Amino acid sequence: MNSKGLDYTLLTLVIIGAINWGLIGFFRFDIVEFLFGDMSWLARIIYAVIGISGLYLISAYGRIRSVDQA
């Protein structure tokens, strides 16, 4: 998988995570908890993957800046 494909995949996961946080904030509805149980091992893995995706996407700021300078 090239870097662009990885970026889009991880960005999609982070957007889904943001939508979930919006649902929690507005409606007190956690879709991950609803689908996978209250802090089950699978729910924890999903939260961890989305968190790691967000951390990875911090590097997108540096890549966007380097493309603008080129």
Image (spheres, rainbow, N blue to C red):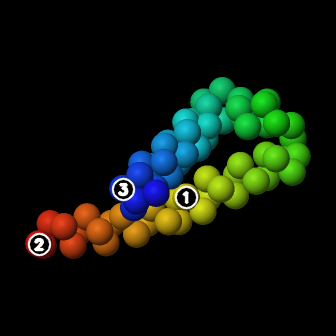
- Proximity of marks 3 and 1: CB atoms separated by less than 8 Å: no
- Give the SS element for disc 1: helix
Tell me the kind of residue under disc 2: Ala
- Proximity of marks 2 and 3: CB atoms separated by less than 8 Å: no
Q: Can you give x and y, in whole percent of width and height, for residue 57 in the image?
A: 45, 61
Q: Residue furthest front?
A: 1
Task: Left or right? Give the position of 35 relative to 69.
Answer: right
Task: Left or right? Give the position of 39 relative to 32.
Answer: right
> Depth-wise, is mark 3 or mark 1 nearer the camera?
3
C-alpha distance separating marks 3 and 1: 14 Å
The front one of 48 and 22 is 48
Task: Left or right? Give the position of 7 relative to 37.
Answer: left
- In this view, 55 is above or below 27: below
- Give the SS element for disc 2: loop
Tell me the kind of residue under disc 1: Ser
The front one of 53 and 27 is 53
Residue that appears at 88% across and 46% down:
40
**Residue 70 seen in render:** yes
- Proximity of marks 1 and 2: CB atoms separated by less than 8 Å: no
**Residue 25 seen in render:** no
C-alpha distance separating marks 2 and 3: 18 Å
Q: Please name the residue that numbered disc 2 is placed on.
A: 70
Within 10 Å of disc 3 (Cα), the crowding (few <14, some 14-19, many 20+) is few
Give the mark nearest the N terminus, 2 or 3: 3
- Give the SS element for disc 3: helix
Q: Please name the residue that numbered disc 1 is placed on.
A: 53
Give the mark nearest the N terminus, 1 or 2: 1
Q: Can you give x and y, in whole percent of width and height, for residue 5 in the image?
A: 41, 52
- Count of number-bearing discs: 3
Q: Can you give x and y, in whole percent of width and height, for residue 52 in the image?
A: 60, 62
Residue 4 is labelled as 3
Res. 37 image quadrant: top right
